[in-house]
Image (spheres, rainbow, N blue to C red):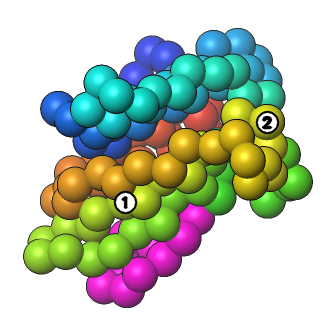
Amino acid sequence: MTMETPRIRLGSGGAWLELVQAGEDSWQVTADWCSSLSADFTARLTGDEVSDFAAQMRSHLRSDSRFSAAVTPGRNNPLVLSAVPVGDGFAFFVRLTPNGDDDVCHLQMEINPIDVGELRDMFDALHASLVR
């Protein structure tokens, strides 16, 4: 399954995170927690960085263990997902840093468990849309 515009959305309802390609090296990062806290910013990321992130997530989803994955290994990393196995899925702790590695201006939130099969499908589709 491929998509027109590379994107992924984790969570629904009260807490969600979305990453959408906005240009060649530009991605829109949007998150919302119970309509009380939100983030919406553009991150400079290459398609290769996001593709590698999707591949890393796909690999981690094969395990039953906690893991953490960053969208880019660089210092200006805007997104880190930490996953905890819960039942047949994973719950996520999200750390967004619009200004790169910033311990002052960041958003941390939790996304309720998502079924591992659904997660695999989402990250497979994101990866496929970037590897053309």
The vertical placement of 64 against 92, above or below, is below
Marks 1 and 2, the one that precedes in the sequence: 1
| Magenta stretch contains residue 59 | yes
Instruction: Work out which quarter of the rendered image holds the C terminus and state it.
Output: top right
Q: Are marks 1 and 2 in contact (CB under 8 Å)?
A: no
Under circle 1, the secondary element is: strand
Q: Position of residue 93 (x, y in %)?
A: 42, 60
> Which image quadrant is residue 42 in?
top right
47 left or right of 84?
Answer: right
> Which image quadrant is residue 9 in?
top left
Q: Position of residue 10 (x, y in %)?
A: 33, 42
Q: List the single residue furthest toward the right.
A: 75
Name the residue at 12% across, 76% down: 87
132 left or right of 94?
Answer: right
Other residues around mark 1 within 10 Å, as few (<14) / some (14–19) / many (≥20): many
Which residue is more in the foreground, 16 or 10? 16
Q: How many marks?
A: 2
Residue type at the position of mark 2? Asn
Which residue is more in the foreground, 127 or 114? 114
Residue at the disc numbered 2: 99
The vertical placement of 89 against 99, above or below, is below
Name the residue at 35% across, 54% down: 110
Range of magenta residues: 56-69
- Mark 1 vs mark 2, foreground winner is 2
> Which image quadrant is residue 64 in?
bottom left
Residue at the disc numbered 1: 92
Name the residue at 28% across, 39% down: 15
The vertical placement of 116 against 5, above or below, is below
| Magenta stretch contains residue 31 | no
Q: Is residue 15 visible to us here?
A: yes
Q: Position of residue 68 (x, y in %)?
A: 54, 70
